[in-house]
Amino acid sequence: MLKKPIVLTALILIFIILSIKFFDKFVPVNKLSKLTDATYVTYYKKACDLEDSEACNVLGDMYHYGNDVDTDYEEAVEFYKKACGLENGAGCNNLGYMLNQGFGIAEQNWHALKLYQKACKYGEMEGCYNVGSMYYHGEGSKRNYYKAALKFQKSCNEGIAQGCNDLAYMYAHGQYVKKDIREAISLYLDACQMGEASGCNNLGYMYEMGNDVSQDDMKAEKFYTAACELNDRASCNRLGTVYGKKVQEIKSQADLDVAVKSCGLGNPIMCYKIGLYMEKKREHKKARSYFEKACNAGESLSCKHLGDLHR
């Protein structure tokens, strides 16, 4: 009487094993989630099919950046094309970017410029800025500072910080426009206040070096700090240099505090000086760590000093 359940159990086990082996050939379990779109993606696609240009552009962004879907530049290009065809300025601007970078489509700078111009025409101010940038660098057309300045001004007036920064650079260097340092400073400040790190950095550099302004480390520190807080690494490094100017030799705790901050912001000379200070205090382990940090950052005196210590 026990034979039937045993046979039945064996048959069930064989069926399960064969089923798993057979099913695995078609639908791997770890890929099931990729077979279907999230519900909202499906609805966005329906909206795009119904010629909702914003939905098409959002879908382009999703495939461009891999948001809730697998990154697929070619798919992004198709959605951007549809958005642009529906007179969506952001879609034209994004499609121009893909063409300019060669993402998902062959690089064509002249075509990218046309798309940026179309985006600008549809009221997309980033497109206007990109037109200016293309003319400034001579991409997709001959270099034309006049047209670049016009587009930078237009985008700046509409709150595009990069437009303000680049127009400021043209005023600072007299490129097409008459050199005007006051106007350059005003535009850099606008860019900085809008959150453009380059605007803050450029102001910091002008005041640090005294380029067409009175040299002022306090103002340089202020603007480098603003740029550094916007994650501009170059500004953090320059800030370290500004701090370092305050300390020729570490003689007090106040000097040490400034030097440590400067070293932490990427000034290898200050790291080296801290190493020398620690060495004098016979804190050899700390000294060596600062020498190594300075050496790794390209400070040759620290590398030589480490070599002498190992001799």
Image (spheres, helix red, strand yellow):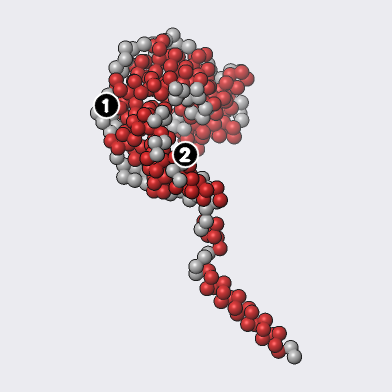
Callout in the foreground (2, 1): 2
From the viewer's perspective, is residue 12 above or below residue 85? below
Across and down, in percent, residue 155 comes to 41, 23
Mark 2 or mark 1: whose residue is earlier in sequence: 2
Q: Amino acid at mark 2?
A: Glu
Farthest residue, direction top: 214
Badge 2 crowding class, 10 Å Cα cut-off, few under 14, some 14 to 19, many 20 or more, is: many
Residue named by callout 1? 143
Q: Residue at x 36, y 29 (%)?
A: 121
Q: Amino acid at mark 1?
A: Arg
- Of the pair 44 and 237, the residue shown nearer to us: 44
Q: Does dot 1 land on a helix, a strand or a loop?
A: loop
Quadrant holding the N terminus: bottom right
Farthest residue, direction left: 142
Question: Does residue 205 appear anywhere in the picture?
Answer: no
Q: Does dot 2 land on a helix, a strand or a loop?
A: helix
Across and down, in percent, residue 31 comes to 53, 59
For the residues labelled 2 and 1, the Cα–Cα distance comes to 33 Å
